[in-house]
């Protein structure tokens, strides 16, 4: 009778042991693959973030370079307009030798310019570079000519790209009308820019083998693209943008970054774009995943191969263990072998390996313990995780303790620890699985941990780079517009008012051109400091790009307060500046436009247009002054557009 009972006991013993054994291997492999997947995803996300920051930095440089180029050409065009109108006023006509000599002198000083040409009121090219003997060339049917002829108050216009009738090249034009003494339309002056000038500049940018740099017009038509598509032919004028791109432009028309598939070659790219200030142009940089994820893909193949080897070894260990289930000693040896394998893998893939007993006290810990905890490995033995964490009372820690009491595996549990010597707080990530003996009794936990403090700091730095200007450390355009929207929500809720100030530095560009970009950067930093110290803690100052700033004045009691602050800022900017490597102090001014919510506009775009229009009027009047939008009855038509 005893023999059958013995067999039943053996059968009852063997089945739960096998189940526990295979569950352990299953959870072990699940944990390993979960960690591998998470690490790979985190690594990919980091590569993508780096690509996004790189694309944003390049497109920021591109925006500044192209905008500066357009402004230089505009300055040359304005000079020619002044000379033509002066000759018409004094002589009643334009002297061809005199005006062309003047144009040639200007042309030699502007490397951006392919040429400068002047038409009469009928659109026929009469004067300028390479125009001799070409009286048959007319631009009367060009959109920009028709627009300027019918809009006397229009300012500077940028044309669509067009194959030049004289230059035989793809060009864009910076165009402005000139008038007779009585104000009648006399023709237009065009600054011609060879789009290949920008293609040469784009070629110097490091965007990878499959990256692209593109300049588009206001309708998203391509002006120049580097490199041209592999299919051949010119891409000038094409508007082939993806639906994802179109959706981004609707929600974020001035600046944005996204990942999407190209309509040209189907490659996935990280695209960053930015509008060029007041010009109807858009700069775009696209970095290909094939380039910036190449290193990550190589890393992925190595990690997956190591995980596969681990799985094969653990499964083989399982079969070997089951073969010796009849012997408790051999079963324990197999578990010990698997434990050592887990420890080896953990020590190779993490900062330290740890084991705990059934009371959650550390019984063994090895690896980079001193760097993360400031104590030796022996100093950690006997302590519990809840004894060293400084956020033990948090809901997350209580949830973790409940998970331990339920004997469940856990992955990437994060807690904070204060270094005993320096007081520095480190963020620790721990993963573990429950351990049971051959009889299924709970023995404790084992797993591995990592110090993720630097990862969290890197994530914070990336967030800061995305929201703050790297030169002045002020909020950038994206963060400022977000705060503006929040201010509108709060003011609408509290029936309050606030002011938006747009600031544009006067005479900054001559300083930047004469003394170099380094001096210009130092000047922008000093200006930012002067504005910052003259504002309240509740106010927001941001750099929108170039030499443009914006100020948000909240908690505004009287609208006159905004004017007082504007005057105060003008006075703060006015004193001379001492710059490194510049022998004499430099002096600049600032033009400020003031818009009041809700008197001048009740939405973000309306307030921006109002403040920008008021600033432009202040600059037109004399510069180094301010204008309030609500006090001006008439506005230049081009700023309203």
Image: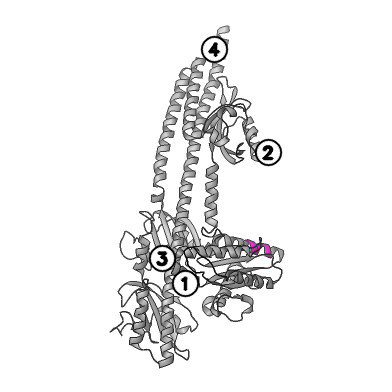
Which element carries disc 2, helix, strand or loop? Answer: loop
**Residue corresponding to mark 1:** 510
* Residue 614, horizontal then vertical, whole percent: 58, 75
Q: Which residues are magenta?
A: 486-491
Assess disc 1: are there few (<14), some (14-19) or many (≥20) residues with their C-alpha within 10 Å of its C-alpha.
few
Is 398 positioned to the left or the right of 311 in the image?
right
Measured in 3D between alpha carbons, the distance from the residue under mark 2 to the one under mark 3, in whole angstroms, is: 55 Å
Measured in 3D between alpha carbons, the distance from the residue under mark 2 to the one under mark 4, in whole angstroms, is: 51 Å
Measured in 3D between alpha carbons, the distance from the residue under mark 2 to the one under mark 1, in whole angstroms, is: 60 Å
Lower sequence index among marks 2 and 3: 3
**Observer-nearest of 94 and 585:** 585
Assess whether mark 4 and mark 2 are in contact (beta carbons under 8 angstroms).
no
Lower sequence index among marks 1 and 3: 3
**Residue corresponding to mark 4:** 7
Residue that lies at the very extreme toward the left in this rendered image: 133
What residue is drawn where x is 42% and y is 70%? Answer: 69
- Judge depth for marks 1 and 3 and give the one in front: 1
**Residue corresponding to mark 3:** 215
**Residue corresponding to mark 2:** 393
Measured in 3D between alpha carbons, the distance from the residue under mark 4 to the one under mark 3, in whole angstroms, is: 83 Å
Asked if the magenta segment contains residue 221, the reply would be no
What residue is drawn where x is 32% and y is 82%? Answer: 137
């Amino acid at each position: 009778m005893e023999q059958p009972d013995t067999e039943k006991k053996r059968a009852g013993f063997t089945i739960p042991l096998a189940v526990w054994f295979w569950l352990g291997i299953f959870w072990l492999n699940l944990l390993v693959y979960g960690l591998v997947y998470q690490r790979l995803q985190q690594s990919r996300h980091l590569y993508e973030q780096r690509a996004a920051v790189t694309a944003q930095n390049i497109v920021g440089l591109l925006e500044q370079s192209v905008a500066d180029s357009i402004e230089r050409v505009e300055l040359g065009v304005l000079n020619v307009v002044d000379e033509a109108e002066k000759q018409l006023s004094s002589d009643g006509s334009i002297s061809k030798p005199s005006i062309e000599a003047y144009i040639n002198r200007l042309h030699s000083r502007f490397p951006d310019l392919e040429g400068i040409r002047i038409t009469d009121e009928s659109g026929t090219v009469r004067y300028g570079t390479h125009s001799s003997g070409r009286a048959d060339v007319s631009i009367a049917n060009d959109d920009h000519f028709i627009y300027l002829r019918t809009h006397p108050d229009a300012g500077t216009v940028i044309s669509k790209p067009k194959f030049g009738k004289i230059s035989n090249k793809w060009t864009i034009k910076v165009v402005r009308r000139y008038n007779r003494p009585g104000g009648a339309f006399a023709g237009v002056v065009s600054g011609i820019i060879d789009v290949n000038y920008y293609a040469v500049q784009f070629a110097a940018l490091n965007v990878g083998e499959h990256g692209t740099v593109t300049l588009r017009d206001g309708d998203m038509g391509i002006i120049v693209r580097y490199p041209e598509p592999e299919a051949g032919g010119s891409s000038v004028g094409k508007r082939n943008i993806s639906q994802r791109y179109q959706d981004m432009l609707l929600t974020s028309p001035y600046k944005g970054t996204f990942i999407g598939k190209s309509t040209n070659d189907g490659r996935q790219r990280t695209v960053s774009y930015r509008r060029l200030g007041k010009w109807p142009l858009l700069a775009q940089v696209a970095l290909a995943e094939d380039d910036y994820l190449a290193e990550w893909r190589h890393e992925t193949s190595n990690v997956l191969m190591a995980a596969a080897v681990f799985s094969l070894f653990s499964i083989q260990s399982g079969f070997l263990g089951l073969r010796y289930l009849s012997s408790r000693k051999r079963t324990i040896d197999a578990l010990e072998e698997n434990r050592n394998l887990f420890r080896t893998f953990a020590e190779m893939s993490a900062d330290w390996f740890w084991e705990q007993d059934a009371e959650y006290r550390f019984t063994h810990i090895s690896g980079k313990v001193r760097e993360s905890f400031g104590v030796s490995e022996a100093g950690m033995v006997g302590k519990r995780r809840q004894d060293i964490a400084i956020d033990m009372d948090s809901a997350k820690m209580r949830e973790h303790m409940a998970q331990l009491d339920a004997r469940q595996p856990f992955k990437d549990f994060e807690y904070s620890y204060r270094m005993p010597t320096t007081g520095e707080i480190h963020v620790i990530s721990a993963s573990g699985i429950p351990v049971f003996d051959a009889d299924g009794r709970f023995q404790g936990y084992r797993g591995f941990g990592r110090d993720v403090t630097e990862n969290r700091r890197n994530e914070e730095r990336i967030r800061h780079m995305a929201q703050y200007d790297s030169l002045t450390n002020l909020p950038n355009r994206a963060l400022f517009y977000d705060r503006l929207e929040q201010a509108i929500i709060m003011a609408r809720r509290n029936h309050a008012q606030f002011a938006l100030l747009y600031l544009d530095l006067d005479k900054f560009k001559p300083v930047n051109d004469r003394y170099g970009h380094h001096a210009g950067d130092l000047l922008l930093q000093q200006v930012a400091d002067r504005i910052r110290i003259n504002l309240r803690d509740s106010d927001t100052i941001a750099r929108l790009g170039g030499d443009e700033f914006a100020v948000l004045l909240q908690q505004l009691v009287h609208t006159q307060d905004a004017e007082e602050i504007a005057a105060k800022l003008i006075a703060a900017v006015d004193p001379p500046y001492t710059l490194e490597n510049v022998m004499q102090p430099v002096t600049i001014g600032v033009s400020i436009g003031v818009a009041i919510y809700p008197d001048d506009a009740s939405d973000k775009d309306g307030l921006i247009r109002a403040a920008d229009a008021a600033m432009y009027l202040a600059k037109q009047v004399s510069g180094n002054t301010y204008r309030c939008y609500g006090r001006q009855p008439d506005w230049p038509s081009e700023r309203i557009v």
